[in-house]
Amino acid sequence: MTDYVNPKDLVREAVDLAAKKADLSIKDMLIRGALAGAFLSFATSLVFTVYSQGLPSIVGAILFPVGFVILVLLGLELATGNFAVLPAGLLAGKVKLSRLLRNWLWVYAGNALGSLLYVALFYLAITNWRTGNGGPVADLLKQAALKKTVAYAALGGSGWGTAFIKAILCNWMVTIGALMALASRSTLGKIAAMWLPIMTFFALGFEHSIVNMFVIPSGMVFGAPISAVQFLLWNLLPVTLGNIVAGAFFTGAALYATYPSEASAVADISVPAVSTLSNDTKSAFTAAPAATLNPT
């Protein structure tokens, strides 16, 4: 059997996956969401550690997908990926809008909880339980947090729009990575397929809402002069909205439109097929012996 899953089968599997995600309990969404947020934060802190050693930024981009790979292979829940998967299920008629919104809300909350938990633990770790200042890693996190909030605020509406567009471009690649995990039957194939688009978005410096749940709060606890309002208004709000637009329309709806699920195709041809059968063979079935029609 070939390892490759063609796009039409991939979208069908994504629709089936959407239905499973929509039926998750709140407990599972919170736990799986929290673990996903934590593992993505692990990967992000790894990148900043690499940057602090003076290595080129492309090295960090190459390493960052480890967090995404871990959470996907463990079947965890990442809101930004679900921004594409659940809309495909909605269009296929397998997910109700209320269940889609329910999943997005609880998974997003779980991602935030896991990210903030890791922020606290990471802070205690690199400050030697608050006896140090965190060194160059902390300095880089403060710089990044300021760039993602105060710098946007200084530009006013243009800054908000910039964050929004960067978020669209980010999650376009992230959701392609989430779906490409379904493009292979093997573990190595899934890893390779996911790695490419995730590395691409990170190397380009675009905006990912869940990553920012680690970066900006980390910068804040290390002393960056950023208020909670600035964090929410100038980053998390536009970035989350941009991530939703990219996932729902640029990936989920777009791929479903060009590769409709097999169930939809069958539904389109079922009526004429049944009608033709009943018209052409009615007499044959009427004349058939009962034993033939009802075998025991």
Image (cartoon, helix red, strand yellow):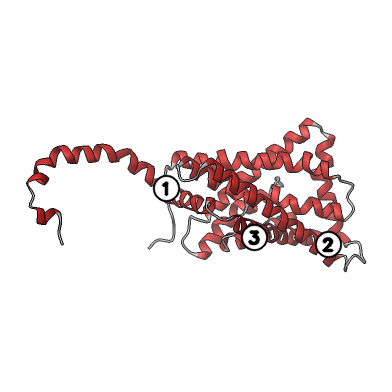
Q: Residue 52 at x, y = what percent?
A: 82, 60
Give yes or no for contact between labels 2 and 1 (Cβ–Cβ under 8 Å).
Answer: no
- Dot 1 corresponds to which residue? 8
Q: Nearer the viewer, residue 264 or 134?
A: 264
* Amino acid on which the number 1 mark rests in the picture: Lys
Residue shown at the point (72%, 62%) measured from the top left: 42
The answer to whether one can see residue 233 in this image is: yes
Horizontal side of 149 relative to 10 (left or right) equals right
Q: CA distance from mark 3 to mark 2?
A: 22 Å
Q: Where, by quadrant of the figure, is residue 237 drawn?
A: top right
Residue shown at the point (84%, 46%) measured from the top left: 146
| Quadrant where the image shows the C terminus | bottom left
* Amino acid on which the number 2 mark rests in the picture: Tyr
| Quadrant where the image shows the N terminus | bottom left
Q: Which element carries disc 2, helix, strand or loop?
A: helix
Horizontal side of 276 relative to 290 (left or right) equals right
Residue shown at the point (62%, 41%) measured from the top left: 244
The answer to whether one can see residue 200 in this image is: no
Whichever of labels 2 and 1 marks the residue nearer the N terminus, that label is 1
**Alpha-carbon neighbours of circle 3 within 10 Å: few (<14), some, or many (≥20)?**
some
Give yes or no for contact between labels 3 and 1 (Cβ–Cβ under 8 Å).
Answer: no
- Dot 3 corresponds to which residue? 31
Judged by depth in the image, the label closer to the viewer, 3 or 1, is: 3
Q: Which element carries disc 3, helix, strand or loop?
A: helix
Farthest residue to the top: give it: 157
Whichever of labels 3 and 2 marks the residue nearer the N terminus, that label is 3
Q: Residue 71 at x, y = what percent?
A: 61, 60
- Dot 2 corresponds to which residue? 123
Q: Nearer the viewer, residue 59 or 167?
A: 167
Farthest residue to the right: give it: 131
Q: Which element carries disc 1, helix, strand or loop?
A: helix
Q: Relative to 32, is 86 above or below? A: above
